[in-house]
Amino acid sequence: MRTRTAQRGLKKRFLLLSGVVIAFLLLYWGISFSEELPLCAGCHKKQVEGKELHPVMKTQGCVSCHTKPHSKTAKPRKFLPATGVDLCWGCHDKTKFSRQVQHRPVAEGQCMSCHNVHVSDFPKLLLSNMPDLCFNCHDKAKFMNKTTHPPVAGGMCTSCHDPHSSEVEKLLISSSPGLCFSCHDKQRFSGKKDVHVPVADGLCLSCHEPHASAGEKLLVKQAPELCFNCHTKSKFEGKKVMHSPVAGGLCLNCHAPHQSDSARLLLAEMPALCFTCHDKSDFSHKNVHPPVAGGLCMSCHMPHFADNKKLLPLRVNDLCLECHPQVAQEPHAVSGMTKVGHPLASRRVKVVDGNRVKLSCLSCHEPHSSDWIRLFRYRANTPFEICARCHKKF
């Protein structure tokens, strides 16, 4: 019984002595720490007032950079072991700032032209929010126009650009079109039968401004001037007859700018494309001209311009004879029923409804479709019935 009481007494004395030792050590260390890591904020209040504090200050304190504060043996400038960017490399990976293309402030070691070294009210210790920070150097007017790229409008400069260094020109995060596909659906620009050459080559910026534009879709220029950067303008000028969409510069009414499953980047196959403007009923009568039935609109018409009416590549009679050469060799109005022959495109004669017109194949025949035999323009069930349309005395 006495032995247990003695043991308990020794245990109490040991705990008491241990407490005294720990208290002494804590007091000693506290004084030591207070001398080594003084309460800097007591004097340097501005360096700690803000939403974002430099992470190293939170973990290791001010002396992680100011190694010997107020020490006579320290280097004189701010008590730092190094100056400028060399101090930053003590923590930050230099390789991230030393790639092929460097932001000018980075290349010149001007970290503090963008960052506050101690504290900031903005993320990443920036001096101000983006894009206002960027506009300290970059002309704001170049980023504001009628149409603004959404990332630019949202001040998301670093969604496309690395602020420090990059292996790609303009400090881009990656090359185009890969960068563009981080937002835009790649399937809309690849995979179809016919891809516009600039699109296939990833030359997005040959047609689009990356930041802002005075035109729609961030285009560098508006069509057709934009198209003429590559396509020869003279081929679309000075012609007698111009297709209405061409004359109006409406290239995109017929052509897709990026890709298409139809040849020549057409929005649809012919004749469906033509029927977006032309009335389909005019081409769907009882008898249909074979080229029309086959959708071969461009076998008779030029799509952009021509020197002949109706965008024909040749004069109407010559064009018809391309497919119907026998007409000029057999008994017909073209070759002549008699020795003199029927006047055809040789002089003006009085025809339907008192109109004086120059005779041609189209005087009797519809070029597209008709409800009468031989594509006759007027009611006729026999070839000679068409003659009565002009020769009423017979």
Image (tube, rainbow, N blue to C red):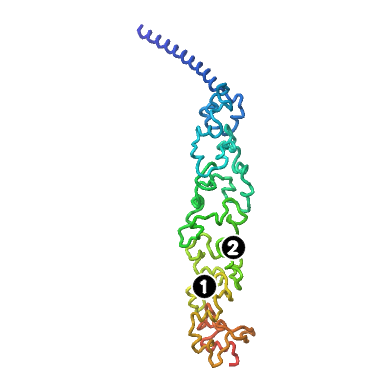
Could you say whether the residue bearing mark 2 is in a helix, strand or loop?
A: loop
Label 2 crowd bin: few (<14), some (14–19), many (20+), radius 10 Å:
some
- The residue lying toward the viewer, choosing from 300 and 239, is 239
- Locate the N terminus by quadrant: top left
Q: Position of residue 145 (x, y in %)?
A: 63, 52
Q: Position of residue 195 (x, y in %)?
A: 48, 60
Among numbered discs 2 and 1, the one appearing first in the sequence: 2
Q: Is residue 188 above or below residue 390?
A: above
Q: Which mark is residue 363?
A: none
- The residue lying toward the viewer, choosing from 133 and 285, is 133
Q: Is residue 343 above or below residue 311?
A: below
Give the Cα separation between the discs numbered 2 and 1. 22 Å
Q: Is residue 21 above or below residue 129?
A: above
Label 1 crowd bin: few (<14), some (14–19), many (20+), radius 10 Å:
some
At x 50%, y 55%, the residue is 202
In the rendered structure, which amino acid carries the disc numbered 2? Pro
At x 47%, y 13%, the residue is 20
- Pointer 2 residue: 224
- Locate the C terminus by quadrant: bottom right
Could you say whether the residue bearing mark 1 is in a helix, strand or loop?
A: helix
Task: Tally the marks.
Answer: 2
In the rendered structure, which amino acid carries the disc numbered 1? Met
Q: Position of residue 118 (x, y in %)?
A: 57, 31
- Pointer 1 residue: 298
